[in-house]
Every structure is written in structure tokens, then in C-alpha cells.
Amino acid sequence: MQIERNQMIRTIPTKGYAKDIHFGTGGWRAVIGDEFNRSNIQLLAKALSMKMKKEHVEEEGVVIGYDRRFLSKESVKWACEVFAAEGITCWFVNRSSPTPLIMYYVEKHKMHYGMMVTASHNPATYNGFKVFTYGGRDANEDQTKEIEKYLFEAEKLPEMKYIEYENALAAGLVKEFNPLNEYLDNILDNIDVKAIRDSKLRIVLDPMYGVSQTALKVILSTARCELDIIHGIHDTLFGRRMPAPSKESLTELSTYVKEMECDLGIATDGDADRLGVIDDKGRYLTANDILRLLYYYLLKYKGWRGPAVRNIATTHMLDRMAEAFGQVCYEVPVGFKHVSSKMMETDAIIGGESSGGLTVKGHINGKDGVYAGSLLVEMIAVTGKRLSELSEEIEEEFGKSFMVENSYRFTIEKKEELMKLLFEEKKIPEFELPIEKVSYMDGCKIYFEDGSWIIARFSGTEPLLRIFCEMETEEKAEEYSKRFKEFLHL
């Protein structure tokens, strides 16, 4: 095989630029045709090959999947060509698939590395790569810094080795396969299919032109739900909207739920790791609402016990629930790699972020909109209560809270000004509420003595400053957010 491989190897001058490939909170994302191009993709594959060989794990290969974005499938092939030249077998999931499927496969088969071509919920002009490490986890900061170090080493090489895809496939250096069934079986084993089947629910799914349709269709059909689907075709422009399950992008789903009297509307982002929900009254539920519902369901109705983990910009209602049931809620920086790491450390039963990602113990070590959506369906079936009723139940027991989020673009000069003001001079606006403490763990977060809070932080995936605020009333949250914005002259 070594002789055959050497005979197939071709070379081209190394053209990728290490400075173009930077891993943020959700992997590497870049504009297609700009930093996201064939040369940089192959440079990344070379860097990961070098890392795998240094760690002596190259023999097990790497599993790679892709979503429905423009150039996603081609990007996998470009990466495979480099891995093949390095003698690393590529296990290529040969159809568009959910990101959590790749994470599941890495964990289940005890692999050290997996990759997914996706830019998640970013605009259609973006694409990118996520890297997963042993246990099916998002590569943490130490791992991504190491990959970036190898990128600069790879950039210095005069030539890039590759084997043309069809030749690599014929030689067995690329193996095309589809492990969807074992991923689906794991979800079906972890939900109460009988309770769902007995409930005769009507569900409408909006995959947002992404990759969740097949998985959720199989799961909900197996549980005998009546299932309708909107926006299920393959459209690399995502219907000319952001493939993020936000309130603004789910108006059609809300209308469908109300007009067709559905029990629930489920939406997933472009790569199916994030979830959006429309309740039985057609109301949009935020990621914070979903986290509250699921943690409450696990604690009260399923009788589970264990901590919760949330990022620094996610609802503190989880803290109230945890305390009421004798548990703890842990706070971590933004980035699901921090959530999953803390969950493993503390044996938490749920972890999530206000941006829409969550995971529940017993499935995978990362976000999964397919599993989360299935669990919400189980919750309705087991409790016999609609989502609107369960939301009211939580408000009666734990009170109300409202979060507002606003994002602002900035110039390079403005970012430097903001960095100096917030993190060097450490200046903050004046507020009437007494302040308990200020944290700079990830952004500038102000904790008030009554349990409310506000944070300003730079996005790890886009050139944006985000301001989040959670208060007892929406008006107060809006007021404090506006005051922070004006203080920063945005």
C-alpha cells in the first residue's frame, strides 16, 4: 500500500496562509472564496495530519462530514486528498449530515479526531470546519492553539502533497459510508418512544433548508407522530435568510403551528446542532426558555439529580432551579467546548447556551438539536401538558425573567477603543441597582445583588459586540442594555 500510495502522490506549491485560519468559539469560519478556499482547507488538513502523527494516532484515521452549504462536499474531498497523501484514512460520511452525528461517531468508535464542514448558523456566504477530539468533544482552546501552531509549520513547506480523490477512494484511503442508523438508534434508546406513540402528537418541522430533516423524520415517524415539514429542500442560500432558529426567522413556522393546530413546532439551524421551538400557542421559545423547560422536566418529572452548566451569557433561572432541587449551576465562558468540559468534570445532567445549543447527559458530549427536539416531544407526551402549560408552571414556581440581546458591528479602531475602556481601564456605566461583582472571565459581566445581570462581550465567530441583559421585566432589560450601548458609544 505504501508503494501504491507513493505512486499516486501529486504535489503543488503550498499556497495556504496560516493567518487566515483562526479557531473561534465554534471552529474556523470564513467567507467562501476569501479565506475559505481550497489552499487553506488543504493547509488545515496538513496541519491536523502533522498533529495526529505527533500523537501517534494516525492509524485510526479521521471521520469527516459536511452540511448543505455551498462547497461543503467539495471541501471534504479537498481535505481527504491531503490526508490520503499522508497515509491517514478518511471515513467520509458521503451525504449531508447533522454535526452531532459526527460527534457521536467519534465518541462511539473511540476515535481521536473528527471534522465537520459547516459554518453552523452563519450567513450563507460563510463556510468552515469544526474539529472534534477524543470523546466526541469540540476541540478545546489548547487543542485549537496546537492546530494553529502546526498551520504555521505547514505553511513553510514548499509543496503540498495530495492524492486525487477518485484515486484515494479506489485505493481504500478514503472510505465512504453512512453511520446515520446507529446515531438514530442511540436517540431512540434514550427517549420514551411508547409515551410519544400513545400521545398522537402533531409536529411541524422546519430544518431551515439544513440537514436535520431525515434524522427527525425517522425518529418522529417511528414514534408515530403526525409530521409536517416546511423548508426541507436543499438551498445553499437558506431561503435568503440566516439559518439560525431566531424569532425573526421562524415566523412561518409560528403561523403554521397556529393555523394547523399543531402541538409543537421544531426548527434546527443549518447543521442541526441548535434548536428553535414554537409552542402550542404559536409563541417563539428562546434558547433560555428551552433550557429552563428541559432542566425542570429532568428534575421534577424524570427524577434526575445533577448540576447544570451554562455559559456566561445564559439565563440564571437555571441557578434558581438547581438551588431549589439541592443542585448547583456552573458558569463557564462562551463556547460549547467549555460547557461540555465542565459537564464531564461535574457530572452535570444538562448544559447549554443562550445561542441555542444544549446537551443532555447520556447521549453525546456536545450540542444536538435533533436529540433536544426529540426530548421536548417526549416531555409533552410524558407530562400530558402543553409547552405553554409547563412554561406557566415554571413561572409560578420560580418567577419571571426576561433577556434581551443586541449586537453591534465595529471598526478595528473602535474595537481597540472598546478593549481599552472595558478591559484595561475597566470602566462601566452607572446603574441604580446595587452591584454584587464584576467579572472579566469572558467579556465584561456585571452581577447585580437582586440576581439580574448584564454583559458586553465580543463574538468569537463574527465581528460583533454583543450585549445581553436579564432582568425581571423586559422594559428594565432594554433600558439597561441601551445604557450600556450609549456608554460604549455604539
Image (spheres, helix red, strand yellow):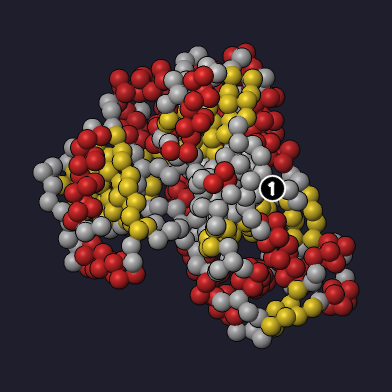
Residue 94 visible in image: yes
- State which quarter of the image contains the C terminus: bottom left
Q: Which of 410 and 27 is in front in this view?
A: 410
Q: Which of 140 and 277 is in front in this view?
A: 277
How many marks the image carries: the answer is 1
Tell me: residue 409, above or below residue 212. below
Tell me: residue 58, above or below residue 390. below
Give the percent coordinates (x, y) of residue 220: 64, 26
- Residue at image coords 59%, 49%: 237
**Which residue is tagged 1?**
96
- Residue at image coords 66%, 53%: 66
- Residue at image coords 75%, 80%: 11
Residue 348 visible in image: no
Hey, what amino acid is under mark 1?
Ser
Tell me: residue 173, above or below residue 351. below
Tell me the SS state at disc 1: loop
- State which quarter of the image contains the N terminus: bottom right
Quarter assignment of residue 424: bottom left
Give the percent coordinates (x, y) of residue 475: 22, 35
- Residue at image coords 51%, 75%: 19
Q: In this view, does 332 lie to the left or right of 11?
A: left
